[in-house]
Image: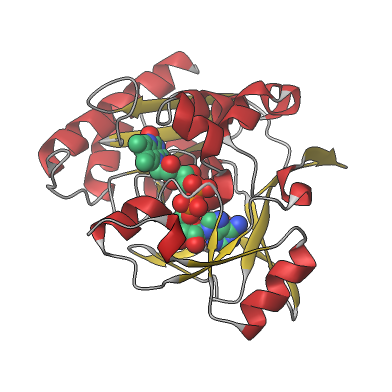
Amino acid sequence: MRTAISTLDVRSVATIQDAVAVMRDEARVPIAGATDLFVALNFGTLASRRFLDIWRIEELRRIAVNGDVLMIGALATYTDLIRSPVIAARLPMLAEASRLLGGPQIQNRGTIGGNIANASPAGDSLPVLAAVDATVVLRSAAGERRVAFNGFYTGYRESVRRADELIVAVEVPAVSGRQWFRKVGTRAAQAISKVVIAGVRDDRSVRIALGSVAPTVVRARRTEEALGAGASIDEAVQLLRDEIVPIDDIRSTAGYRRLVSGNLVRRFLADTQ
Ligand SMILES: Cc1cc2nc3c(=O)[nH]c(=O)nc-3n(C[C@H](O)[C@H](O)[C@H](O)COP(=O)(O)OP(=O)(O)OC[C@H]3O[C@@H](n4cnc5c(N)ncnc54)[C@H](O)[C@@H]3O)c2cc1C
């Protein structure tokens, strides 16, 4: 089933206040860059025909540092993230993830808020946000609330976000240590990840997050704890392979994902020694 924007009921707003008022009063699905949304519409998997275009809300594009916290507005596109000197200085692995995401067209339209809200376990920005213990900022007409990114997803393509809530930003505390990101897909561009991984390592701790190996993005907590307690790289790789729960699907097999995830963790630990 093909769709066209002209057949849809779309309202457009230019402020967060107007957006959350509309989301309170009318059951409308937000549209940001529409790169995921139009795919769902064209496949007929999105029931709604009533949308709220938030693309014009300039205040959602800000990338700034407040105190020690990096604040990334939900409408920041991948191109914004690639070009941002603040991201390059504070969270270079997010710029790297953005460079490897889609192609230039998707990078120009796709937003970090859309990647978070879409809740795919293969979303490439998600392991980065999980590894740095980010916080999702949600706004509704009733007010604002902050949710730990690592508690945001409740199951496959499910999150704690209510239908009347807009993701307005994601906050990242200062990250110390080395950041590391890898994506394994069929090609370097325009390929959804078979496995995607982000890691942070400093003198005291190792943080590892993976995508496409479970129903949601996951932190490898048992592997992290074992490494903190002095486990060897071989032990960590084995533990990681046991800890994740990949599946066979059109993009890969569980066996390949398990093998590659272990190899990536080995590489991460070797590179950041
Ligand atoms: C050809 C192609 C290649 C792609 N490649 C990749 C890839 O390599 N890696 C990857 O991770 N993804 C990829 N994607 C998926 C997509 O581009 C990203 O997930 C993108 O970040 C989605 O952002 P968007 O602004 O376009 O979201 P939209 O499509 O506008 O919205 C997606 C969902 O999020 C909701 N939403 C959007 N913004 C908000 C908000 N602020 N608050 C609440 N809900 C919101 C919408 O209602 C919708 O349900 C690809 C898509 C295509 C079409």
Residue drawn 60% across the image and 24% down it: 82
Residue 118 vs residue 141: left or right? left
Q: Name the quarter where the N terminus is drawn.
A: bottom left
Q: 262 or 161: which is nearer to us?
A: 161
Is 222 located above or below residue 8 in the figure?
above
Residue at horizontal 42 percent and vertical 71 percent from the top: 49
Which residue ends up furthest to the right in the rendered image?
67
- Image coordinates of residue 107 in percent, x first then y, are 51, 31
Q: Nearer the viewer, residue 191 or 7?
A: 7
**Count of labels shown?**
0
Q: Is residue 34 visible?
A: yes
The image's colouring method is secondary structure
Compared with 72, 153 (above or below) is: below
Residue 3 figure quarter: bottom left
Q: Residue furthest bottom?
A: 25
Residue 140 pos. (x, y %): 69, 74
Quarter-wise, where is residue 24 in the image? bottom right
**Which one is in front, 48 or 125?**
48
In the image, residue 119 above or below residue 180: below
Task: Kindly tell me whether residue 140 is visible in this rendering.
Answer: no
Residue 82 appears left or right of 141? left
Identify the residue at image location x=59%, y=82%.
Answer: 26
x and y percent of residue 164 in the render? 60, 76
Residue 145 percent location from the top left of the image = 71, 70
